[in-house]
Image (cartoon, rainbow, N blue to C red):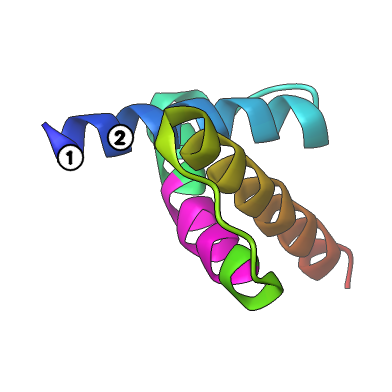
Amino acid sequence: MGLILWLIIGGLAGWIAGNIMRGGGFGIFGNVGVGIVGAVLGGLLFRLLGLHAGGFIGSLVTATVGAVLLLWIVSKVRQA
């Protein structure tokens, strides 16, 4: 059950981040990938800042923040 929830959170976070940063998502697999990598990045960032977000909503916020950061980094690399 944990893997399924992780994929759902990843997909939602990737979709939300895609809408925030570019106005659209990357398809189901792209959204899940961006959301999962973003969740790891967001978790590291929150831990460095001493923040803790628990539960489904907290995990979604953490993953979304990380996914937005990831998309911002990717856009800067593409511009260079």
Along the line of sight, which residue is nearer the eye, 10 or 59? 59
- Can residue 30 be seen here? The reply is yes
**Number of dots carrying numbers:** 2
Classify residue 51 by image quadrant: bottom right
CA–CA distance in space, label 1 to label 2: 6 Å
Q: Is residue 25 left or right of residue 2?
A: right
69 left or right, relative to 15: right
- Extreme-bottom residue of the structure: 48
In the displayed image of the protein, which residue is found farthest to the left? 1
Residue at the disc numbered 2: 7
Residue placed furthest toward the right: 79
Q: Quick one: 20 or 74, which is closer to the camera?
A: 20
Q: Secondary structure at mark 1?
A: helix
Task: Identify residue type, mark 1.
Answer: Leu
Residue lying at 46% horizontally and 43% vertically, measured from the top left: 54
What residue is shown with label 1? 3
Q: Quadrant of the N terminus?
A: top left
Q: Position of residue 31 (x, y in %)?
A: 49, 34
Amino acid type of the residue tagged 2 in the rendering: Leu
The quarter of the picture where the C terminus appears is: bottom right
Query: Magenta segment range?
Result: 36-45
Q: Residue 73 sits in which quadrant?
A: bottom right
Residue for point 72% across, 60% down = 74
Against 74, is 18 above or below? above
